[in-house]
Image (spheres, grey):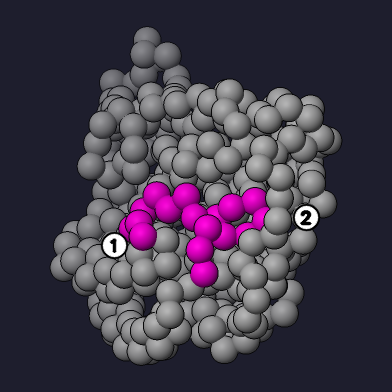
Amino acid sequence: MMPMDEIKDSEMIVHLGPQHPILAGPFMLDLRLEGETVKEAEFTLGYGHKGVEKILEDRMYISCIPVTDRICYLASLSNNEVFCNCIEKLLDVEVPERAQYIRVILMELSRIQSHLIGLGEFAEFIGFMSMFMFLVREREDILTLLEMITGARLTHSFVRPGGVRLDLPENFKEKALKILPDFEKRVREDQETLESDEIYIERTEGVGVVPTSLAKEVGVAGPVLRASGVNYDIRRVEPTLVYKDLDFKVITATAGDTFARAHCRFEEIYESIYIIQQCLDQIPSGEVRAKLPKTLKPEGEVYCRVEDPRGEMAFYMIADGSPKPYRVRIRGPAYATLQALPPVLEGVYVADVPAIIGSMDGCTSEVDR
């Protein structure tokens, strides 16, 4: 940010944060404005730093799972997944096929509920309060299904090294197949209501464009990356579990604007429903957890990644044969995606800043891990 003594008489500095309704958690966004136009943007992170990596290095492997939940509570299951995947690779453990299907179902349900709350907050930021209420209402169905499996609505701690904690409830398939079609119908109606609104279109089309070159340069991930025309999804690039056996489209767009980012998330919800329906149809019987030693003492070095709701979530782990990880490093998607925010905000109207930030679907909890 330009020093204060170099600010022109026609300019002013506006500080948004570290607590502000349009921020997905505490960080400071400084804007240099000339009239209503943003000339320069700068953000400062670290207000909610938790030291997760060091916490993980000080706990036995199984005790780390609840900590991974809290990297980002909206992506707790994918965080469980990538951590357990590291242990499984280090121990050379084969996850039973039934457990793999269950883990895919959980990951996709988690993706849906995360997208719904993200889209609801985004709509609220630009004045569509009723849309926030609609999408939160639809999200309750997904949280109900997650609670049936895991017993929790947000922080699940359900994935285990070698499988999952428990099998699916007896009536889960019937319940899910009854809920999902009606759920999809309601979400499509919500999407149509939003995307047919003239004011919404004016506020989002061509606003906050993330060029493909910038997206690649700063490491943007997930729907934000795919909305800028990059067909990149870990479920296709490096499939884990049974993703390689499932049929689904990688949703992309070319505009790279606020409208495209929200649109991609809506479309990803429908693909996740399709994936879940396939899993329920194909899931075999069998065990849901491989037999492992009571105390896990893996040894080696591993890098694992999954496609969480916001993009590529990766763990690098070094294990020294003790009951605790020797080193853990996390590469989360939200931190990388936020790097695109300052250049994208340059030249936009200050009134468009909330819409652009909301369409990025950030998670400051994950950024300040």
Indicate the quadrant where residue 48 lies. Answer: top left
State the residue position of label 1: 120
Name the residue at 35% across, 89% down. Answer: 178
Q: Is residue 251 found left or right of 342 in the rendered image?
A: right
Name the residue at 58% across, 85% down. Answer: 278
Magenta residue span: 151-167
Front position among marks 1 and 2: 2
In the image, residue 236 lies in the stretch drawn in magenta = no
Indicate the quadrant where residue 218 lies. Answer: top right
Residue 69 horizontal/vertical position (percent): 46, 45
State the residue position of label 2: 93
Cα gap from disc 1 to disc 2, whole angstroms: 40 Å
Name the residue at 79% across, 27% down. Answer: 320
Dot 1: within a 10 Å radius of its alpha carbon, few (fewer than 14), some, or many (20 or more) residues?
A: many
Tags 1 and 2 touching, CB below 8 Å: no
Q: How many marks?
A: 2
In the image, residue 163 lies in the stretch drawn in magenta = yes
Residue closest to the far front: 294
Q: What predominant SS class does the magenta segment belong to?
A: loop
- For badge 1, the amino acid type reads Gly
Residue 63 horizontal/vertical position (percent): 53, 36
Is residue 64 among what the camera can see?
A: yes
Kindly state the secondary structure of the residue where label 2 is placed.
loop
- For badge 2, the amino acid type reads Val
- As rendered, which of 189 and 48 lies closer to the eye? 48
Name the residue at 47% across, 31% down. Answer: 368
Dot 2: within a 10 Å radius of its alpha carbon, few (fewer than 14), some, or many (20 or more) residues?
A: some
Residue 310 horizontal/vertical position (percent): 52, 54
Residue 67 horizontal/vertical position (percent): 48, 37
Q: Which mark is residue 282?
A: none
